[in-house]
Amino acid sequence: MVRKNVKHPSVIVLLTASLIFFFCCPAAFSSTTAKIIIAKDGGGRGLIEDTLPAITLAAAEGAEYIEFHVMMTSDNELILFQDLTLDRLSNIEELFPGRSREDGSYYVADFSLREINQLRLTDDEGNNPPLSLAIPTLDDTFSLIHRLESTLHRQSGITLEIKYPWFYTDAGKDISSATLTTLARFGYTDQSSKLYIQCFDPEELQRIHNRLLPEKQMDLPLIQLIDSNDGMETKQKNLETYSPYNYDWLYTNSGLKMVAGYASVIGLVGDKVVDNSGNLLLTDYISAAHRYGLQVFVTSLDNQAGQLPDFADSLFSLLTFYLQNVEMNGFYTNAFTETKIITDRFKSDKDEKNKLPPLFSSPNLPPLSDFSEREEEITQ
């Protein structure tokens, strides 16, 4: 019996549906997992960074993790502040004239907690009316977070950065040990605490991992932040002289292997990952980090005018670029709510794609000529 040469609709339907899905949902074809979203600088978002109101707002808006920074006063009290000096963000010169060092700056480590409590943070964002807030202690911060967790009925993740340990070591102070003691007092002792310790100083992170955590019977994940070699964050002492820390060794295979021995995460600045024109810079390095069991976070994913690279006209386009092209595990951002929505939608698209039959889910569709040949076979 000779079959009539009738068009078979199934191939055309499948082809059309697949093409529609492919072109309408390109993000769905990039591999993704749940991303860690960190509200940077205490979740400032128009409030002053590292303050209790900023942290409260971030927690109320559902920030999964909140980043804040720890400094030490002259009487060894821990406060939330991220600059080595008080010049940029406080009225220190007005209240304590003549207390600067020879370089003209007012260093946090030169003032007691009683003196720090007299200061008011100044709003450097040009907002009107300006805010005037106090510098919080680490104890006050954790007390607030615990109260917020009880009120909001959810745990707040924390990335706590120990600032300038090299500076405090030179002054005979151990900011890392004091920080861990406070963490233990508030119940942050192990992996279930949902708390990362981060630092730009590789030598200090190794000391924390190899000595301080075991001594205090604690087990907390560490984040190795990597900066440029300008010495703004970390210095190292050679022959009694401090010079800018050189991070170049961290970009080698042996360096990655060493970092994997003490840290769980590497934090990279965005412009180290992709340049202003959208060219990927460290794809092999990031893949190697994952092979060694390290996660990779990108820092300073901003949603502010002048902060976006030239190739991205919005946070959405910048974040979509990362999700489609770079296997990042987490993002530090001032736009944590928007980032969470975008990454969750991206993951949802990916999960939905994985539920489809192979023809729908695979982006490697055969050429149109192959479908024509297959259709001819069916209709003969």
Image (tube, rainbow, N blue to C red):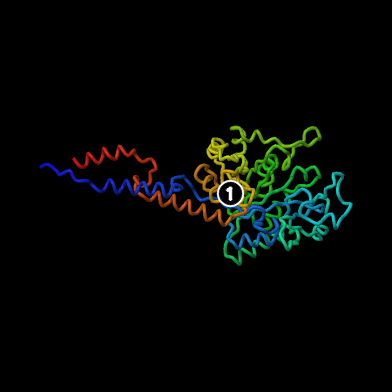
Q: Percent from the top left, x then y, of residue 63?
A: 59, 58
Q: Percent from the top left, x then y, of residue 131?
A: 73, 62
Residue in the image at 38% along x and 43% along y: 362
Check the image and report above or below for 11 versus 242: below
Q: Which residue lies furthest to the left in this view?
A: 1
Q: Percent from the top left, x then y, of residue 139?
A: 72, 59
Nearer to the camera, 237 or 35: 35
User: Tag 1: Cα neighbours inside 10 Å, few (<14), some, or many (≥20)?
Assistant: many
Q: Residue furthest right?
A: 98
Q: Percent from the top left, x then y, of residue 83?
A: 75, 49
Residue in the image at 80% along x and 35% along y: 241
Type of amino acid at the residue the image marks with label 1: Phe
Quarter that holds the C terminus:
top left
How many marks are shown on the rendered structure? 1
At numbered mark 1, what does the secondary structure look like: helix, strand or loop?
A: strand
Indicate left or right for 340 with 212 as reference. left
Nearer to the camera, 187 or 33: 33
Residue in the image at 75% along x and 51% along y: 71
Residue pointed to by mark 1: 331
Nearer to the camera, 197 or 63: 63
- The quarter of the picture where residue 145 lies is bottom right
Residue 126 visible to the viewer: yes
- The quarter of the picture where residue 119 lies is bottom right
Indicate left or right for 33 with 54 as reference. left
Quarter that holds the N terminus:
top left
Check the image and report above or below for 245 versus 312: above
Residue 193 visible to the viewer: no
Nearer to the camera, 187 or 47: 47
